[in-house]
């Protein structure tokens, strides 16, 4: 029995579909002498599709450069970073002077009727005024310093998020590039197999007419031919899917792709891979910076207990009796305000506790992310090694299968090898060549995956000559536009008064002795099978528990409660 099912991993576009060959009707005139059978030597090289003469030749570096410039998902993340940059400007705004100009022109006319004389009296009132006001916070209790620190941590986290998105986009480019090449190789292998099986069908029919073979031998060859044609049809669909992935990531359809280069930056050992992920992983650094931002927000909430000192000044002119400049009066005022919170109704303490809980959650997220990243690094490392071993084994298998097929074909012509053995040898060669193509792709994709999770799959590494996006430029530009004479002095004073951001340890889960699972309270489920869902009589009705029904989280012993059910 032949193993004909071959797993085709990957995604890609296809070529023209090959029509199923029709078998010639079997006639039985006087059988002619069997034609001499050819025994062409079997090539040990992997088949390849001919290049499209109308398409241009392109490299992986060109595809990476185009995706880096034009990928909409990457552009959207850059815009998102610019939006988050503005939070630093917004958070530091209390440091800067605020001023406004107010001008007023008032005309009021009032008509009254006198009670005793029944006359109408008109009163007119005109006024003109203008004022300039300014306010400046002199001491903010460390609130603004903590809020600026939190905003800066958010900006750094957003930059790491941009690095992560860039890594995933470039991985999609590299993976789609390798997928197209793999699927083109698989199609070439399958087309060669279709031609080979078609010759086998023709030879079997000729020998059947000569009386050497039977209809069963022809049917075996035709069945094998049909299965390989089905694989070819699926391979062509896979090729078009991979080409679509390439176009979505790069922004254009692929041309004649050259073999990809060896990816730089692969660690020499698994320990170096772990260390690289600890130092460079964008996902891990996002979590670390989010925890720093949460810690700064703890300090900002604690600063709500501190006093605030502010200064206000105004200068103005007005004419209370008319509209004009004949009777203007000038005035000026200045004041300093000290606000000391005494009782806040518990809201400040509550916000502090909430900020501490959020900081604890972010700290746990750092550890969870670290575990996830190291797990992905190990999987990619192991897959790289495994795929390399599969590729080496596959190449040896291709050589052995090709030599075996050549010998079986020669034996078939001489009459001491069966038709089944030829088909089996053809299938072994097909399987070995497909194994090599898939392993080569998987090895390259696993290396790209490893670089992605370490944080090294970047344009600067893959294409050093390409211009890269400056993540710091926008924030530096916006900061340079904020000119204020008081900010340097007020910010220093506010930083000195910043409240502590020391985190508190989360409550520990008590250890309840040796862990033991509860014994089963019912036998394992058996027949009958569930055949329908319990539904309400009215399809539009909604079933809700009673208002006093307690959720499972409020039960003191959920396990005991379930046991009683």
Image (cartoon, grey):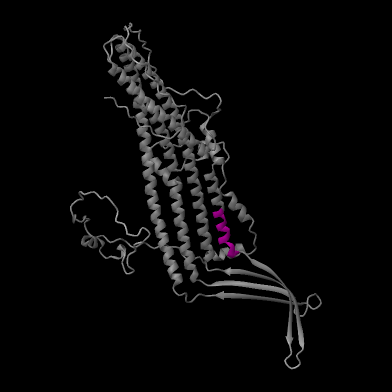
Please tell me whether residue 475 is drawn above or below residue 18 in the rendered image: below
Query: Which quarter of the figure has residue 229?
Result: top left
* Residue occupying image coordinates x 60% and y 62%: 488
Secondary structure, magenta segment, majority class: helix
Q: Position of residue 526 (x, y in %)?
A: 20, 49
Q: Position of residue 140 (x, y in %)?
A: 55, 68
Please tell me whether residue 67 is drawn above or below residue 153 in the rendered image: above
Quadrant of the frame with the C terminus = bottom left
The magenta segment: 83-95
Q: Would residue 436 be visible to someone looking at this image?
A: no
Horizontal side of residue 500 vs 330, given as left or right: left
* Residue occupying image coordinates x 45% and y 50%: 285
Please tell me whether residue 341 is drawn above or below residue 435 in the rendered image: below
Assess whether residue 291 is covered by the magenta stretch.
no
Q: Position of residue 181 (x, y in %)?
A: 46, 29
Horizontal side of residue 158 vs 330, given as left or right: left
């Amino acid at each position: 029995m032949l193993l004909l099912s071959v797993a085709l991993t990957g995604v890609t576009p296809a070529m023209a579909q090959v029509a199923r060959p029709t078998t010639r009707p079997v006639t039985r005139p006087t059988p002619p002498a069997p034609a001499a059978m050819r025994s062409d030597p079997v090539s040990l090289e992997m088949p390849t599709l001919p290049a499209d003469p109308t398409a241009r030749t392109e490299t992986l570096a060109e595809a990476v450069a185009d995706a880096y410039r034009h990928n909409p998902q990457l552009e959207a993340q850059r815009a998102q970073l610019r939006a988050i940059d503005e939070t630093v400007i917004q958070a530091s705004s209390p440091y800067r002077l605020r001023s406004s100009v107010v001008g007023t022109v008032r005309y009021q006319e009032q008509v009254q009727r006198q009670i005793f004389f029944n006359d109408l009296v008109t009163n007119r009132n005109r006024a003109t005024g203008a004022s300039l006001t300014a306010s400046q916070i002199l001491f903010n209790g460390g609130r603004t310093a903590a809020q600026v620190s939190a905003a800066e941590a958010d900006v750094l986290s957003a930059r790491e998020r941009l690095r992560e998105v860039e890594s995933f986009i470039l991985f999609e480019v590299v993976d789609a590039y390798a997928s197209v090449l793999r699927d083109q190789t698989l199609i070439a292998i399958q087309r060669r197999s279709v031609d080979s099986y078609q010759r086998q069908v023709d030879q079997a029919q000729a020998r059947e007419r000569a009386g050497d073979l039977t209809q069963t031998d022809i049917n075996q060859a035709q069945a094998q031919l049909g299965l390989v044609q089905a694989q070819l049809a699926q391979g062509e669909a896979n090729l078009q899917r991979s080409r679509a992935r390439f176009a979505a990531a790069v922004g254009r359809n692929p041309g004649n792709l050259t073999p990809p280069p060896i990816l730089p930056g692969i660690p020499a050992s698994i320990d170096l891979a772990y260390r690289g992920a600890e130092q460079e992983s964008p996902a891990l650094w996002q979590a670390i910076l989010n925890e720093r931002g949460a810690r700064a927000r703890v300090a900002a909430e604690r600063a709500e207990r501190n006093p605030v000192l502010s200064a206000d000044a105004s200068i103005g002119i007005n004419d209370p009796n008319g509209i004009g400049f004949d009777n203007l009066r000038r005035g000026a005022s200045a004041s300093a305000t000290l606000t000391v919170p005494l009782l806040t109704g518990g809201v400040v303490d509550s916000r502090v506790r909430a900020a501490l809980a959020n900081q604890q959650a972010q700290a746990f997220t750092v550890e969870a992310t670290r575990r996830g990243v190291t797990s992905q690094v190990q999987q990619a490392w192991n897959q790289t090694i495994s795929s390399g071993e599969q590729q080496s084994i596959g190449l040896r298998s291709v050589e052995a299968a090709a030599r075996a097929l050549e010998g079986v074909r020669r034996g078939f012509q001489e009459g001491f090898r069966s038709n089944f053995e030829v088909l089996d040898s053809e299938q072994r060669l097909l399987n070995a060549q497909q194994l090599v193509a898939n392993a080569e792709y998987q090895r390259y994709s696993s290396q790209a995956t490893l670089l992605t999770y370490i944080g090294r799959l970047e344009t600067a590494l893959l294409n050093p000559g390409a211009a890269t996006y400056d993540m710091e430029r926008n924030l530096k530009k916006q900061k340079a536009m904020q000119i204020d004479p008081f900010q340097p002095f007020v910010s220093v004073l506010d930083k000195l008064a910043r409240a502590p951001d020391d985190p508190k340890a989360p409550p520990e889960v008590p250890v309840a002795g040796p862990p033991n699972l509860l014994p089963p309270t019912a036998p394992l489920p058996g027949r009958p099978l569930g055949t329908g869902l319990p539904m309400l009589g009215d399809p539009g009705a909604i079933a809700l528990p009673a208002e006093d029904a307690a959720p499972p989280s409020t039960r003191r012993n959920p396990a005991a409660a379930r046991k009683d059910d």
